[in-house]
Every structure is written in structure tokens, then in C-alpha cells.
Image (cartoon, rainbow, N blue to C red):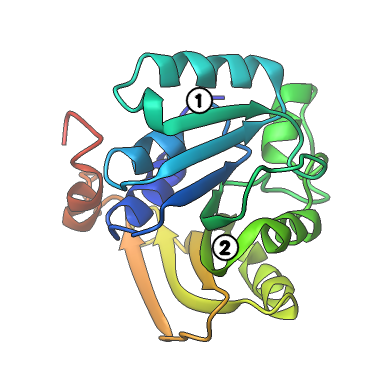
Amino acid sequence: MKVCTDACILGAWFADKGLPESKVLDIGAGSGLLTLMLAQKVDAQFDAIEKDVPSFKQMKENIEQSKWKDTINAFMGDAITYVFPQLYDFIICNPPFYENDLKSGDTKKNLAKHDTGLTLECLIQVIAQNLAANGSFGILLPFHRTAPFEQLAFDKGFHLHEKLLVRQTPGHNFFRSILHFTRNNIHTGQTGELIIKQKDGNYSSAFTTLLKDYYLYL
């Protein structure tokens, strides 16, 4: 699947936090985008799992061509049933987005964009089973699915640490949210907002600052 702007925002937002985690898991890693973004700024050992064969092959190729290949392990498998070798300090995921929405005729796109393969209920269970006692996780969601997922996470004993709401322009409604949950009750109540483009069509200064290390033309 093609690299999308909102996934880049997810990777850059967490990479900029300078997370001190030593063991990181990327669930449904696709081409390896998030793992490679984090690896550039976070000193950690990374595991990345992907079930789609062509995506997994692309991820392996991308990792092998990067300077961070020695810090990344790529697994082929389904996160729901995979037995991971350890617990993780941080888990990141850009999960399938849509539930009960119109699907395309492309099976690969449906697996990537619809939760036919990994529902949010299954995802939060996988995270709970594989996150260390003091760990945290980050997730990207459509804005309209934010509140239901927050409830799922709360029911599993997680606490919302911070939230970033994303809109395309000042005139658009929020369309994505990035959530950072912890096992510890460190609730800051912090909610930020990111606008991708200004009214004139140029990228906003906040977006440029966030992505400048990854977008060569910013």
C-alpha cells in the first residue's frame, strides 16, 4: 500500500518524543514505514509483524536497504495468533480503519483499510497481552472511531496520556486522531491539534516542523 500522510504524522509524532523504550513492536507493519521512522530517532530494538505476503516482502527489502537493519526484526504472521518472543515497552499500530463501510473489490486493500482481518477489539487484546507492565502504545484512528476505542482501552486498564487531533485544513473537520495510552495512570489531559495545510494550500508550519526530517521537499 502507498505511504499516506497520516501514517507519516503518526510515525513522526512518536519519533519526536524521544521515547526511551528499548523494545518496540509495530503491529501490521506493512512496508515498514513506522518502524523505519522510529528507528531513525529512537534507540531501541524493533520487531515488526505483517501478515500480507507482498507487504512483508516489501518491508524486508526496505529494511535491508536501510542503515537501521541491524536493529529491526521482521516477522511474517498474524498478530492475533503470533507468539511474540518478549514483552514490549512501546507498541505502535496503524490498524485497519473501517468497520461496516463499503469495501472495494481489492482483497489487499480491504485487509489494509477494513478491519476484516484485525478488529479493534482483537487489537487491544493483542496489545494488552504483549505490552510490558510499564509500557505504552500509540495508535492512529479515524476521528469517528476515537471515542469507542478509548472505551475499549479503558476497559483493558489503559489510561489516555495524550491525544493529537488532525484536520486537513482550517476549514475541515477532524478526520484522524493519534492516541497515546499507558498502563500507568499518568493522565495529563493533553489534547493537541495539527492542521496539515493552510487555506492557501501550503503546508502549515506545524506540519513542516514535524515532518521536515522525513519529507525532503519541506
Say what amino acid the circle numbered 2 marks: Phe
Q: Which residue is mark 1?
A: 2
Image coords of residue 155 (percent x, y): 75, 79
Q: Nearer the viewer, residue 191 or 60?
A: 60
Image coords of residue 183 (percent x, y): 57, 75
Could you tell me which quadrant the N terminus lies in?
Answer: top right
Say what amino acid the circle numbered 1 marks: Lys
Neighbour tally class for label 2: few under 14, some 14-19, many 20 plus, Cα within 10 Å:
some
Residue 172 in sight in this render: yes
Neighbour tally class for label 1: few under 14, some 14-19, many 20 plus, Cα within 10 Å:
few
Residue at the front extreme? 85
Image position of 145 with respect to 217: above or below: below
Q: Nearer the viewer, residue 37 or 214?
A: 37
Residue located at (22% from left, 46% from top): 203
Image position of 148 with respect to 125: above or below: below
Q: Earlier in the sequence, mark 1 or mark 2?
A: 1
Image coords of residue 85 (percent x, y): 66, 43
Q: Secondary structure at mark 1?
A: loop
Q: Which residue is mark 2?
A: 143
Residue located at (20% from left, 39% from top): 213
Residue 170 in sight in this render: no
